[in-house]
Every structure is written in structure tokens, then in C-alpha cells.
Image (cartoon, rainbow, N blue to C red):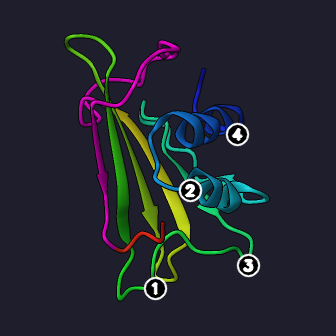
Amino acid sequence: MPNGPEQAAYWRDFVIARCGYPNPARLAEQFDGAELAEFCACGCNSFGVRVQPGTPPLARRGKSAGVVFNADFAVTDSRQLEIMLSVDVAGNLDRVDVSCNANSDPVPHAIPIDLEPFHIWTSRALIV
């Protein structure tokens, strides 16, 4: 499926349910009513997120935007799925990057239902 609103909705649900985010309820709040946009067409499934004003932030306000969460999945022996969540300076989710093998391969269309992350990284700026 090409990257777009339907694919972004799939990844939104996947990230909330299967990435091991430390506070999935707060992450779900960020997505509630958010606009999913800026769909990358390079073969990754990355997209931008515009969170509703007044939504509780994911991370403490900072001097710069950046990645606050990363989950890696071994899809096959030779394919690794990487998911990164980035926030703006206010601490709100502003981008979800979904790539395979450091964006050198297209993201697979089917992810095994029992796939669990083998590596998770969280920023100290996260509000958990």
C-alpha cells in the first residue's frame, strides 16, 4: 500500500499497540484528533503529525525538536523495521518515521502479528 492517510493510520495503531511505548495512553491522546500529513513517497512510511492544541505533551519543552522514542523490529534475518517518534519544541508529537534497514529498503506491507521489538530507546525528556 502506498504511503498516505490509510497507511499512516495503520502505523499510528501499530505504534500505540506494539512498539512498547512507556505511556501508550498519553501517546494515543497525541494522535486523537491529530492531522496526519506530509506522507513521504520514498519507500518509507514516514508522516507528519499535527497535534490538537491543548493536548498533553509527550516530552518536556526543549530548546530543539528531535527524536524521543525508537523501536526496532527484526522482520526477517536481513530486514529490520525502525520506528522513530519525534517531537517539536513544545514536546508534542510532530513526526513518525517508519523505515526498513536505515531506509535502504522499502517498508514491508505485511508485518507478522506476533512481532515484538528487539530494541527500544526512550529519551529522558519523555513524560511517563
Sequence order check, earlier mark of 4 and 2: 4
> Which one is nearer the viewer's eye here, 42 or 69?
69
> Which one is nearer the viewer's eye here, 31 or 45?
31
Residue 53 numbered mark, or none: 3
Q: Amino acid at mark 4?
A: Pro
Density class for disc 4 (Cα within 10 Å; few <14, some 14-19, many ≥20) is: some
- Secondary structure at badge 2 equals strand
Residue with the mark numbered 1: 61
Rendered image quadrant of residue 43: top left
Instruction: Give the mark toward the camera: 2 or 1.
Output: 1
Q: Amino acid at mark 1?
A: Arg
Q: Which residues are magenta?
A: 100-124
Residue with the mark numbered 2: 48
Sequence order check, earlier mark of 2 and 1: 2
Give me the residue at 37% from left, 63% from top: 68
Alpha carbon separation for disc pair 4 and 2? 11 Å
